[in-house]
Image: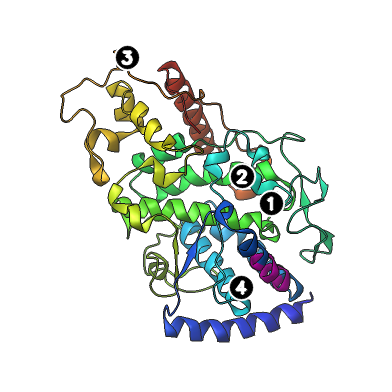
Amino acid sequence: MNIAGLVGLALAHFIVGLTAAQGGCSNVVTRRDIMTLSPQEWSQMTSVLQRMQNDGWFTYFADIHNREFNNIHGNDNFFPWHRRFLRDFEEVGQRYDPNFAVPYWDELRDSRDPAGSPVLSNYRLGGNGFGRCIRDGLQQGWAMAFPSPHCLVRSYDRGGQMQPWYSPEFIFSVMQRYNDMHGFRENIEFTLHGSVHLGVGGDMATLYSSNDFIFFLHHANLDRLWDQWQSWGHQWTMDGRNNAGSSIGLGSGLPHYGDPIGSTMQLGVNRMCFRYAGTWSRRRAGNSLALVSTPPMSNGADSAEAELEKLPLPILQKWFPALVSGSHGAAPVGAAAGTNNTRSTSGSVRHVGHFLVYPAPLTEAWVSMHRFDRRKVAKTMEEAREFVDVLNRAGYKSPY
């Protein structure tokens, strides 16, 4: 699509979007785990996405993400901007089907073996292209137009496999340890965000990564995690700085859109006319690992939390402070019995699981592309490996 075509799409989109913003939420859609969609629902979704591709919308969004790249990464516009971007994409989809909602990929559930995820099977998103055109799945045969004509490329970061991503337990720990947007954002952007982009590779490892529909699944999941963190006492937490180093807050305008950050902070109001399946009804459960990732087996997250709570108190205090303090609705560990939180050996049934594995670090090329502070990235990577070592030495095994 040429520049004139992009400008025409942008103008029409602005006029329709202005009307939608003024009208508020007449229809709140539910974003679901992609693996819960029925074959009929997936068929309907693929039809919408194909029509969006045919009409040039994937080019439109890839162009926006490419132009705004430095304004929306490596600074605290990251979460609100991507929430607004995904909602923009979703609103376009709803012109073809009013019930269209971007699904999410629960990547933490697949973190041990990402390439083996059913999300990457032929009947969903398709798999590896080994640095060439993908050969199956939703976008097989698509001709991407941005930044120049090409097929959609994927190139896993370990050849036919991917390096492991970050575990549900580690992200659960991050969400408890950081109460400011700046700290929370850095520790998600430097970890899960980057590892998924790099693991999939190809278009996903470029400035125009939104060519790949996996981008939208990935960022819907990151947004879901932010929504959970917000519900744990951080609904309106917005601090930090933009790409120019200036302080930003709820009244600051989002790059490209100009909307105030505050307009993105709460789901179901303003223009954020969506919610995530399974979260609203379970919010009273408080700070729960089950809200961070769906376990691969029945009660897996409950078993994991029970095992985490048996860790020695110093480990809990450092890595899972909410489990100790009882904040966010969680019962404080040992509050009733006055236990010292050492592991019980009195015949208790242990969940059979796996030791944690080291997650993939960011590459030097990725760090440079995002203009990250190398010292901060190195510190975060070191901390992630320490987390694995500490929990493995303590005998913790994960059901994920």
Q: Residue at x 53, y 40 (%)?
A: 109
* Residue type at the position of mark 4: Gly
Q: Earlier in the sequence, mark 1 or mark 2?
A: 2
* Residue type at the position of mark 2: Val
Q: Nearer the viewer, mark 2 or mark 4?
A: 4
Find residue 28 and report its horizontal and vertical position in percent.
44, 72
**What label sits on residue 347 in the rendered view?**
3
**Callout 2–callout 4 Cβ contact below 8 Å:** no
* Residue type at the position of mark 3: Gly
Find residue 51 and report its horizontal and vertical position in percent.
72, 73
Q: Residues within 10 Å of mark 4 (few under 14, many from 20)?
A: many
Find residue 19 and report its horizontal and vertical position in percent.
50, 86
Q: Residues within 10 Å of mark 1 (few under 14, many from 20)?
A: many
What residue range appears in magenta?
44-52
**Callout 1–callout 2 Cβ contact below 8 Å:** yes
Q: Earlier in the sequence, mark 2 or mark 3?
A: 2
* Residue type at the position of mark 1: Met
Give yes or no for residue 48 being in the magenta stretch.
yes
- Residue occupied by mark 2: 196
Q: Residues within 10 Å of mark 2 (few under 14, many from 20)?
A: many
Q: Nearer the viewer, mark 1 or mark 4?
A: 4
**Callout 2–callout 3 Cβ contact below 8 Å:** no
- Residue occupied by mark 4: 93
Find residue 291 and report its horizontal and vertical position in percent.
40, 47
Q: Earlier in the sequence, mark 1 or mark 3?
A: 1
- Residue occupied by mark 1: 204
Q: Earlier in the sequence, mark 1 or mark 4?
A: 4
Q: Is residue 12 visible?
A: yes
Dominant SS in magenta = helix
Give the answer, above or below, for where 57 lies relative to 120.
Answer: below
